[in-house]
Amino acid sequence: MPKIKVFTAEHHDPWFNLATEDWLFKNFPDDHHVLFLWRNKPCIVIGRFQNPWNECDLTAMDRDGVVLARRQSGGGAVYHDLGNTNFTFMSPRETYDKDRNFNIITKALAKFGVIAEQSGRNDVLVGGRKVSGSAFRMAATRAFHHGTLLIDTDMEKLPGYLTPDKDKLKSKGIRSVASRVANLSEFNPNITHDSLCDSIKEAFFETYGQRCEVEDLTIARLSKEPSLYATYETYADWQWRFGSTPQFAHPISSRFGWGGITLDFDVHEAIIQKVTVFSDALSVDFIEFLHSALPGTKYCIEDIRKVLYDGAKEFSTEKQAMAADVADLIEKELA
């Protein structure tokens, strides 16, 4: 008989939850099947190979306190809030079966009278509308399948955070595909996070023909795990969330009183590799300065502004103002 474990999380920090998932995946016994249930405060979670500047409206997110998180698995960008329940199944690689996992989810929904079906490789549909999306990860001896379940997510937030100007960037990363989505509460208003989690746990126990104690992964317990805290620091770090972005090109243009300018950035892992500058400005030395000063700089406005301001100190007051104009332009476009 297979061995099972069930965990829940009391906290809603997306970086901590993703770190906990990663820590569980790396530390659970190879012969166990694991269920982990959790949810996050408002955030955007992007796939391992996605470009946050392409997928997200970072200005709107910053304005509303919506954080960015990057997961280890692939797939598209998703919005999480407390109306969204997340599930993670972990299994030994040789007995991993994503269809079994999907059956647990559909069985749990059937307990509420909601008839759901697996669609394609990733999704669960109810009445032709998407209520769940999944992503997957394989390691040498184990595998996981994690996904979302929309219960009463604020649907009005989705387009605001996930549909920026798609003409801004030409990216080599994977772009999200819009889908018709629905909240489970539309089909049964009695579905809540707690009731759905209880139903998933029961379906999990029924599937494996046994029960186990449900372990709550509290902050007090997890704070005693030094490797978990190190993983959390990685997930919270700018370098993981932004610096892991695939190579992309980003052209930025505007016209000022001193002339027009186009900066064509070549960015890899969130570091400016090269910038080609086109301009009709008369200040050749300033344009040459932009060519040479920006490569090697982190692709965030704080670092770019510092490089421009520090480098422009050698120029006249007029050219320092030009540097400020360029910094303001880049800040506007990075949003």
Image (cartoon, rainbow, N blue to C red):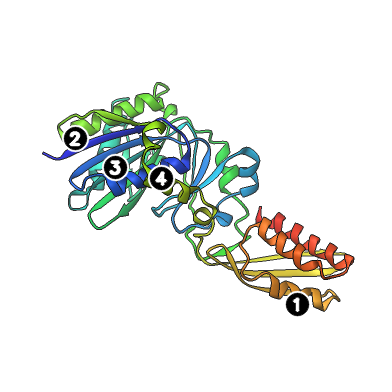
Residue 288: mark in rendering: 1
Mark 4 to mark 2 CA distance (whole Å): 27 Å
Q: For residue 166, what is the image quadrant? A: bottom right
- Judged from the image, the secondary structure of the residue bearing numbered disc 1 is helix
Residue drawn 39% across the image and 35% down it: 38
The answer to whether marks 1 and 2 mark residues whose Cβ atoms lie closer than 8 Å is no
Mark 3 to mark 2 CA distance (whole Å): 13 Å
Q: Nearer the viewer, residue 86 or 33?
A: 33
Q: Which residue is mark 2?
A: 207
Mark 1 to mark 2 CA distance (whole Å): 66 Å
Mark 1 to mark 3 CA distance (whole Å): 54 Å
Q: Position of residue 130 (x, y in %)?
A: 41, 41
- The quadrant the N terminus occupies is top left
Q: Position of residue 306 (x, y in %)?
A: 71, 60
Q: For residue 254, what is the image quadrant? A: bottom right
In the displayed structure, 246 sits above or below 165; it is: below
Q: Which residue is mark 3?
A: 89
- Badge 3, how many Cα within 10 Å: few under 14, some, many 20+? many
The kind of residue tagged 1 is Glu
Q: Position of residue 51 (x, y in %)?
A: 53, 58
Residue drawn 24% across the image and 31% down it: 203
Q: Which residue is mark 4?
A: 19
- Badge 4, how many Cα within 10 Å: few under 14, some, many 20+? many
The answer to whether marks 3 and 2 mark residues whose Cβ atoms lie closer than 8 Å is no
First in sequence: mark 4 or mark 2?
A: 4
- Judged from the image, the secondary structure of the residue bearing numbered disc 3 is strand
